[in-house]
């Protein structure tokens, strides 16, 4: 089992920045690929960013590329999502997920084995 706890959400003005954190406990954190997803009411969970076990590979959704940065600190069992130039359409509940065996479908929420409870990010215009 891996327990994930997101933090850092809140209200931010358009154009502003926010850093989300996801702290992991349980199994060895460095054995998991990590992803950030987001979800709004009535919609499916949407891929945002992915980072491989050792941080060598990172992928982003087109909608956040150039604005968001995913990183991880395996010594602290934490993955981060640095969000810049935020837009109202970035408003969502943000979730981190842990994937033990990536099959290349890093953008598919079904591939992830564990999820946190989510943290709300609201971007005001």
Image (cartoon, rainbow, N blue to C red):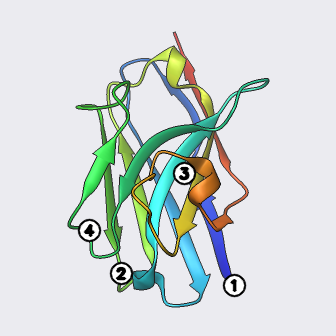
Which sits earlier in the primary sequence, circle 3 or circle 2? 3
Q: Nearer the viewer, mark 4 or mark 3?
A: 4
CA neighbours of label 3 inside 10 A, class few (<14), some (14 to 19), many (20+): some
Label 2 near label 4: C-beta < 8 Å?
yes
Give me the C-alpha separation between circle 4 and circle 3: 21 Å
Residues marked 2 and 1 touching at CB (< 8 Å): no
SS for callout 1: loop
Looking at the image, is mark 4 or mark 2 nearer the viewer?
Answer: 4
Give the quadrant of the N terminus. Answer: bottom right
User: Looking at the rendering, which quadrant does residue 80 occupy?
Assistant: bottom left
| Nearest to the observer: residue 110 or residue 49 | 110
Q: Give the Cα separation between the discs numbered 3 and 2.
A: 19 Å
Q: Which residue is mark 3?
A: 8
Across and down, in percent, residue 6 comes to 60, 59
* Label located before the other in sequence (4 or 2): 4
Structural distance between the alpha carbons of marks 4 and 2: 9 Å
Labelled disc at residue 74: 2
Circle nearer the N terminus (1, 3) = 1
Looking at the image, is mark 4 or mark 1 earlier in the sequence? Answer: 1
Give the farthest residue toward the top: 125
Asked which quadrant contains residue 98, the reply is bottom right
Task: First in sequence, mark 2 or 1: give its number.
Answer: 1
Q: Nearer the viewer, mark 1 or mark 3?
A: 1
Residue 42 picture location, percent across and down: 79, 23
| Mark 4 residue element | loop
| Marks 2/1: CA–CA distance | 17 Å
Label placed on residue 55: 4
Please tell me how crowded label 2 is: few (under 14), some (14-19), or many (20+) other residues with Cα within 10 Å.
Answer: some
Q: Which residue is identified by label 1?
A: 1
């Amino acid at each position: 089992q891996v327990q994930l706890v997101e933090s850092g959400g809140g209200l931010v003005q358009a154009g502003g920045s926010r850093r989300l954190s996801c702290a992991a406990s349980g199994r060895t954190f460095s054995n998991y690929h990590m992803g950030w997803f987001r979800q709004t009411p009535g919609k499916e969970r949407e891929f945002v960013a992915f980072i491989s076990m050792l941080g060598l590979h990172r992928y982003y959704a087109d909608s956040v590329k150039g604005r968001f940065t995913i990183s991880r600190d395996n010594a602290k069992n934490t993955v981060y999502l640095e969000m810049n130039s935020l837009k109202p359409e970035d408003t969502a509940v943000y979730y981190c997920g842990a994937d033990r065996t990536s099959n290349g479908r890093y953008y598919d929420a079904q591939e992830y084995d564990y999820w946190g409870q989510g943290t709300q990010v609201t971007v005001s215009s």
